Image (cartoon, rainbow, N blue to C red):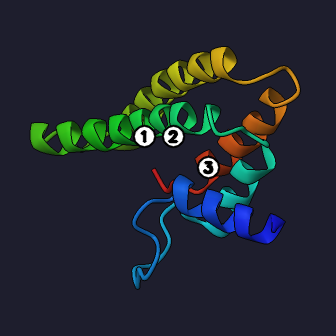
Amino acid sequence: MKKLAKALLFLILVPGLAGSQEPPTPWTDSDVVQTALDIGMNAEQLPQFRAAVTAFLEGRRTAFEEIQQSGQMSGIRRKMRASTADLREQMDADMAELLTEEQYPKYEAYRDLLMSKFRI
């Protein structure tokens, strides 16, 4: 029963993954997903967790697109690091309100692993 619950949680955390033939993205990497599962969130926390992570990921995508559209690609790593830091601070604040004291360090491990998967 626990394996079924973990499989369902995995699909909730990573929508659209079932049947996907695309290479894993940073947020669908199996280690990242397992680290998210290790946080031990309940059913009420999952949608809020997913919303906060989605806001972070969409913010990164938007920042990258804006840099590309500006045509000022010099210093892209610096610009993306600065944008990512701002987005990470917002995600951290959201998680601090959402997670328990026991869960927050596990979230930090998730966040750090997720961050390590990005190339820029």
Residue located farthest toward the front when viewing the structure as drawn: 1
The three-letter code of the residue at mark 2 reads: Arg
Front disc: 2 or 3: 2
Quote the CA–CA distance across marks 1 and 2.
6 Å
Above or below, 24 relative to 10: below
Task: Identify the residue at horizontal 51%, vertical 40% (top origin).
Answer: 50
Which numbered circle lies on residue 54?
1
The three-letter code of the residue at mark 3 reads: Leu
Q: Position of residue 11 (x, y in %)?
A: 54, 63
Residues 17 and 42: in front is 42
Asked if the residues shown at circle 1 and circle 2 are in contact, with their CB atoms under 8 angstroms apart, the answer is yes
Quote the CA–CA distance across marks 2 and 3.
14 Å
Which quarter of the rendering shows the N terminus?
A: bottom right
The residue wearing badge 2 is 50
Quote the CA–CA distance across marks 1 and 3.
13 Å
Which numbered circle lies on residue 119?
none
Front disc: 1 or 3: 1
Q: Say which quarter of the image contains residue 95.
A: top right
Q: Residues within 10 Å of mark 3 (few under 14, many from 20)?
A: many
Q: Position of residue 29 (x, y in %)?
A: 60, 66
Label located before the other in sequence (2 or 3): 2
Task: Identify the residue at horizontal 72%, vertical 62% (top origin).
Answer: 6
Q: Position of residue 28 (x, y in %)?
A: 54, 63
Which numbered circle lies on residue 114?
3
Q: Position of residue 88 (x, y in %)?
A: 54, 28
Q: Residues within 10 Å of mark 2 (few under 14, many from 20)?
A: some
Q: Say which quarter of the image contains residue 21.
A: bottom left
Q: Secondary structure at mark 1?
A: helix
Above or below, 3 relative to 120: below
Horizontally, residue 106 falls left or right of residue 47, namely right
